[in-house]
Image (tube, grey):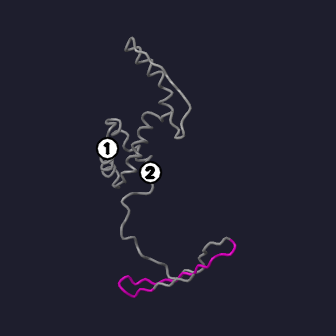
Amino acid sequence: MVSNLKDEGSRGYSWRLQAPINPRNNLWEIKTFREPHVCINQTPRKDHKQLTSAIVGGLIIDMVRADLCVKPVILIEAVKLKVGYTISYWKAWHAKQHAFRFLFGGWREAYNLLPELMAAIVSTNPGTLYQFKTGAPNNHGEL
C-alpha cells in the first residue's frame, strides 16, 4: 500500500506512507513515512489519562463518607474543582465504588462480617431470630 496526501489548501500538509504486507506474519508493515504528519487534535481531552477511577475514589472519599448517596454528577463537579479535569459519569460512578471499598472493604469482607452484625442486632433486640441459608450459585454467580 502506498498512500499519498497532498493538500495545498488551508491546512498545508503533505505526506507519503508505504506499508506492504509482511509475508511472514501477514500484517501491514510501515516501510517509509516521509514528511511527518503534524495535524493537531482539534478537540483536546477534558480528562487526564492517569486520573483513574481508583485515584478519583481517593479524592472523593470524604464526600462519599459524608453522603453515601452522593450522585456522580456532584462528584464530577467536585473533581473538576479539585484537579481541574472533567471526568466522565462512568468514571465518577466507578470512583464512588472504589471509595466504598476504601471505606468498607469489598463484598467478601462484608459477607464475613455478617455473623457479627447479626449478633449485634440480636443483643440489642431481644427475641430477634435469624437464620443463614447458603446454597450453590446459579449460572450468574448469584445465590
Q: Amino acid at mark 1?
A: Lys
Quadrant assignment, res 95: top left
Q: In the rendered image, which quarter contains the N terminus?
A: bottom right
Residue at left 41%, top 38%?
A: 100
Looking at the image, residue 66 sits to the left or right of residue 49; the answer is left
Looking at the image, residue 78 sits to the left or right of residue 94; the answer is left
Residue at left 33%, top 55%?
A: 84
Q: Is 39 located above or below residue 60 in the figure?
A: below
Per the image, the residue denoted by label 2 is 52
**Helix, strand or loop at disc 1?**
loop
Magenta segment boundaries in residue numbering:
6-24
- On residue 71, the disc is 1
Point out the frontmost of discs 1 and 2.
1
Q: Position of residue 3 (x, y in %)?
A: 52, 83
Q: Position of residue 13 (x, y in %)?
A: 43, 83
Task: Check whether the beta carbons of the residues at disc 1 and disc 2 lie within 8 A of each other.
Answer: no
Q: Is 9 located above or below residue 23 in the figure?
A: below
Residue extending farthest top? 126
Disc 1 and disc 2: Cα gap in Å?
18 Å
Quadrant assignment, res 40: bottom left
Q: Amino acid at mark 2?
A: Thr
How many marks on residues? 2
Q: Position of residue 71 (x, y in %)?
A: 31, 44
Between 125 and 39, the residue placed more toward the observer is 125
Q: Earlier along the polypeptide chain: callout 1 or callout 2?
A: 2
Between 123 and 81, the residue placed more toward the observer is 123
Between 63 and 141, the residue placed more toward the observer is 141
**Helix, strand or loop at disc 2?**
loop
Residue extending farthest bottom? 8
Residue extending farthest right? 24
